[in-house]
Amino acid sequence: MTVATDSVSPRASGLSSRREEWRASIRMNHLLWVVCALGPVLALFSIIRVYPILETIRLSFYRYHPTQRTKPFIGFDNYIRLLEDDAFRTALINTLQFCVLAVVITLTLAFTIALLLRSIERASPIYEILLYIPVVTPWVPASVIWKWIFDPQHGILNYWLGFLGIPKLAWLQDEHIILYAIVLVSVWKMLGYFVVVYGVGLRNIPDDLMEAAELDGATPWQRLIYIVIPMMKPIILFTVIIATIIFFNVFAPVYVLTASAQGAPAYDFKVVIGEIYQNAFVFYRMGYAGAQSVVLLLFVLTLVFVQFFFLRDKRGV
Amino acid sequence: MFKERPIVITAYIVCTIFALLAVMPFFWVLMTALKTNPEINAWPPQLFPHQPTLEHFYQILGKENFLRYIFNSLVIALSSMTAILFTSSLAGFIFAKYKFPFRGVLFAIILATAIIPLEVYVIPLYLMVFGVRMMNSYFALVFPFVIMTFGVFFMRQVIMSIPDELLEAARVDGANEFWIYVRVVLALSKSGLMALGVFAFSEAWANFIWPLVVVTTKDMYTTELGLATYQRQFYIEYGPISAGAVISILPMLIVFTLLRRHIMKGIATTGLRG
Amino acid sequence: MIRRLLAIAVCLLALSSVASADEKTKGKLSIWLGYPETLDAFKMGQAEFKKQYPNVDVEILTFELREFEAKLAVSVPAGSGPDILALHDFIFPRYYEAGALDDVPADLAKAINDKAIIDTPFKDIVTREGKPWGVPWWSGRNGLFYNIDHLREAGFNEPPKTYEDVWKYAEKLTQKGPDGQLTRAGISLRLTGPSGGTQKFVYFYYQLTGEQMLEPGSKPGTVRVTIAKNIDAAARALLDHIDHLHGAKKSDDWALKHDAQGFASGAASMFMRESWVIPYVKKNGPNIKFGVVPVPRDKAWGAFNAVEVLSVSKDSKLKQAAWDFIRILQAQPILDNVLASSGWVPLRRDRDYSAILKDEPRFAEMTTPPAGLTLYIEAPNTSYEEMTTRMGEIIQAAFRDASLVGNMDGAKKVMMRVNDTAVKILKDNGIYSD
C-alpha cells in the first residue's frame, strides 16, 4: 500500500493525529481486504496446483490402483522399475530428440523471419497475422489437418514432393520419418507466436543505435551479431524456456497423428506424456505413472535451469 | 532495421513463402471438407471440389452430435475464462498495489508453479475429482482451470502501471477497496483483461489431456475430444473429420480476427501467448 | 462487464449441475457399447422398449473398444456406469468378481441353461457357482477373407486351406508398382495397434501349437504363458511374419491401408478377421467379390472367438426395465438385424436364421463351425490391456526389424522377451499360473 504524504504540508496537530488514526484504520481494513481477496485465490492455488504437485510425488512411492482396496507403500520400487522400462526409455529419448529439434528449428526460423520483417515493416502486420493463424488453432484440429496432408497414398505433401522427384514417403508410418513429421507440425503451429515475440523485442531496439553503427561502417552481419543479439538476450532466454516447456510436454499432436485406426496404421511414436497417460489412465498404474511424472518434472526443471544459467544476462535479467 | 536492397528482397520472398505455408493447410482442409468422398481419395489430388457438397458437415453435426460438443466446449471455455479473469485480476491487484508480509515469497511460489505443466500433476487432480464422484461433469472439466499463474503475473504487470494517485484519490473519497477494484482497477485494465480473456478462452477451448481423462460419456465430450476420438474406429473418413476440424477452428479464428489488436498488445506487454 | 460475465458463468455452472442432478431422478436407462456395429439392433430394441416403458429415456453411447474398457473400469466402481453392461468374455469375470452384476431373472437363467437354446461353452463363460450372471448374446468367430478375382488372376481356384498355403498365396498375390513399392498386399497383417496385434498374432500361433500365448491357468482368474514351452513354433510364427514384411517375399507394407478398409478398397487380397467384415465390405466395397473360409490349419485348427454378454449393473436404479430391455433383445427381428447388419452371430439356437443365410450364404460359414475346428476364447484376467499391449509392442517392433529375416535365433530371443514380459506383468498382479 502506498501512501502519498511527501508533498503534504504540516497541519495543525489535532487534524494530523486524526489523520494518523484514519490511516491506521485504513491499513487495518486493507489487511482485511488483502486477506479476503487474496485468501481464496491462494486457497485455490493450493488445492489446484500446490497440493497436486506434492501429491504426485507422494503417489510415486505407492502402488496405487484407484479401485483396488490396498494401496501399499513400496518405497522406490516404481523408480527401479522405471530404469528397466524400455517403453519409457524410448519415450524419453524420443521426447528429447523432438524437443531439441523443435526448439532449435522453430526459434531460428522465427528469429530470422522476425528480423527480415523489420526490413519491410510496413507489410509486417499482415505477415504476422497470417503466421499467427496456426497459433490460435487448437492442436487437435491442426493435427487432423496435417494427418491428411501426410497420408502416404492420397496426401498432398507426397504429391508435391513427387514433382521434386522424391518418392512417396510414409510420413506417419515409418519409424524414422515420423519424428520429422511431428516436428514439422509443431514448428508450423508455433512459428507465428515466436515471430511476434521477437518482433516486439526487435522493435524496441533504438533506431539511432543501428544507424550509428551503420554510419560507423558496420556490415549488416556485424550489426546483427554485436548489437541485435546481445540486446535480445533476455527475450531469447524467455522464448527458449517457453518453447522447451511447450515442446517437451508434447501430447495432443502425437496422440492424433499416431492414432491408428485399424485400417490406416501409424507408427506408435512414444513420448513421455503419452506413457504417463497410458500407464495412469489405461493400465491404472497410478503410482507408477506418478513416478514417471516426477521424472518429467525433474527433466523440465533441469532444462529450464540449465538454459537460465547459460543464457541469462549476467548483468541481471 | 536493415534497409539494404538484397535483404529487403529476401525478406519479401522468404516471408511470403512462410506466410503461404502457414495458411495453405487451412485452405486444404476446407476444400477437403467440401469434396465428395471419391474426390477426396482421387489421385492425383484435385485442388478444388468439382461438385462441392455439405454432406460431411451434415454428418458430423447431425449424426455425430458435434453440436453438443461445441456447446460443452463453449460452457467450459466461458466459465474458465470468467473465473481466470476474476482470480487473476484480483490477485494481480493485490500483488501490485499492496504491501504485506510474505508478499515476495508467495508470488515466487505462484510463479514457480507456472513452469510446471498440468500434465505432471494430472493424476492427483483426477483422483480428487474421482473422490468427490464428480467425474464426467462440467465441474470436473472447469475445476483445474479457474486460476492461471500467467494470468496473475500478467494482470500484476498491467495493474502496476495504474498510477497510485488514482487509488489514493478514491480512498480519500471514502471508497472501500472492493469498490476501487471494480470501478477503478478493472475499468482501467480493460485492454489487458481482453488479452488475458482471449488467452484463457483459447487455452480452455484447446485443452486436450484433461477432458480426455475425466470425460467418460460422449455427451460430455469437448470439440477437441470429439475430433480426436472420431477417427479411432475401424476406419478413417477424412470428409467428416475435415468438416469437424473446420468447425473446431472457426470460433478461435473469429475471436482472433475480432480481437487481434488486443492479443498482439497482450503479447507485447509480457510476451504472453494470446 | 466482468459482473455480467460472472453472472453468466455462474448461471451456466448452476444449470449444468442441475441438469446432471436431474438425470439421476428421471427415468433414464443407459447402455454403453464397445462395438458400434450393433447400434442398429439396440435402436430397434429401444423402439420396442418405448412401448413398454414410455416414461423411460434410453441413452445408448458407443465407444471405441479399448476406450470402452477403460471408461467402464473406472465408472462402474464409482457408481456412474451404465445400467446395461455389454461385456465381452474376457472382461466379464472382472465385473463378476467386483460384485457389480445383478442376479439374472429366473426365466432368462432357464433359457441360458437350456442346451437347446444356448450352447454349453457359452453358458460356461457366464456361469459361476452354478448360476449364470449374464446373457450370452452374440459371438464372433474369425475367418479368412479372400478376394475371388485376385485369386483367380493369380491362378488359384480355391482359397488356401493350410498355414503354409497362406504364405505361398500371399507371395503370389502381392503386387508392386514400377518403383518397387507395394501397391497391393497379398495378405493384410496386423502391424500396428499392439493390443489387437497380440490377438491377431495368435491366429497364426494357435495353428502351430494348439494353444494361445495366454491360456487360463489352474485357478480361475490366473493365466498361463505358453510361449516358452512352444518356443520353436512361436519363433517360426514370428519369422514367417518378418520374412513376408521385408525382402523378396514381402507381402504387406505399413504404408498401405489395412484390415477391412484395405480389403474393401482392393488394397489387400486376403486377411483374417471376424464376421463383422461381411456387412462392412458389402457396404464399403460393393465391387469386391469376396469369399470367406475357416482359418487355415496346421497341426492344430483353432478359431478366435469373442462372446458378448449382457448383464445389468447392481447399482442400476432401473433393474426391472433393464432386464426387460435385454428380453426384448432376444427377439427374432433384432437378432436378425445383429447378424445381417453387424455380422456378429447371435447365440440363441431356438431362432431361425435361414432367411438371412439364404440371402447371404457367407454367414453360414460363420454360424456353423466345421467339424474339427476348435473355438478358443481369450483367457479372462485383470491385466489384459497392459499385458497384451506390452507383448504386442515387442512383436510389432520385431516386425519392423529387417535384420531378423531368416534369423531363427533372433526370433527365439524376441519371443522369449514376449514370454518374460507377460510373466512379469502376471506375477506383478498376482495372477500368474504355471
Image: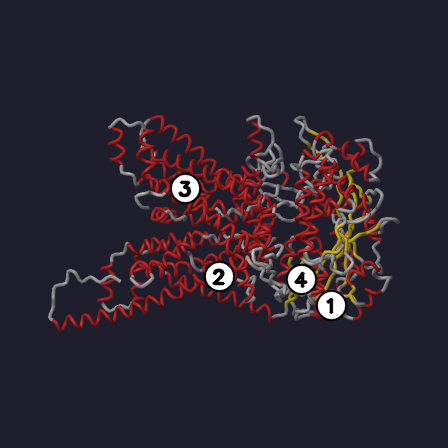
Would you place residue B111 above or below residue C409 in this image? below
Q: Which chain carries label 1?
A: C
Please rate how many residues cluster around mark 2, counting C-alpha atoms within 10 Å: few if below 14, some from 14 to 19, many from 20. Answer: some
Q: Nearer the viewer, mark 4 or mark 2?
A: 2
* Image quadrant containing the N terminus of chain C: bottom left
Please give the label number shown on residue C31: 4
Find disc 2 in the rendering and name its residue. B143
CB under 8 Å between callouts 2 and 1?
no
Measuring from the top left, give residue B15's x and y in whole percent. 41, 34
Q: Are marks 4 and 3 on the same chain?
A: no
Would you place residue C399 above or below residue B96 in this image? above
Q: Mark 2 lies on which chain?
A: B
Find disc 3 in the rendering and name its residue. A194
Mark 2 residue element: helix
Q: Are marks 1 and 3 on the same chain?
A: no
Q: Which chain carries label 3?
A: A
Would you place residue A142 above or below residue C355 in this image? above
CB under 8 Å between callouts 1 and 4?
no
Q: Residue at x 37, y 40 (%)?
A: A198
Give me the C-alpha separation between circle 4 and circle 3. Answer: 48 Å
Please rate how many residues cluster around mark 4, counting C-alpha atoms within 10 Å: few if below 14, some from 14 to 19, many from 20. Answer: some
Mark 1 residue element: helix
- Can residue A196 be seen here? The reply is no
Give me the C-alpha separation between circle 1 and circle 3. Answer: 61 Å
Measuring from the top left, give residue A39's x and y in whole percent. 38, 66
Q: How is the image coloured?
A: secondary structure
Q: Which amino acid does label 3 sit on?
A: Phe
Mark 3 residue element: helix
Residue C186 left/right relative to B210 = right
Q: Which of marks 1 and 3 is in front?
A: 3
Q: Which amino acid does label 2 sit on?
A: Phe
Q: Which residue is drawn at 47% across and 39% down?
A: B23
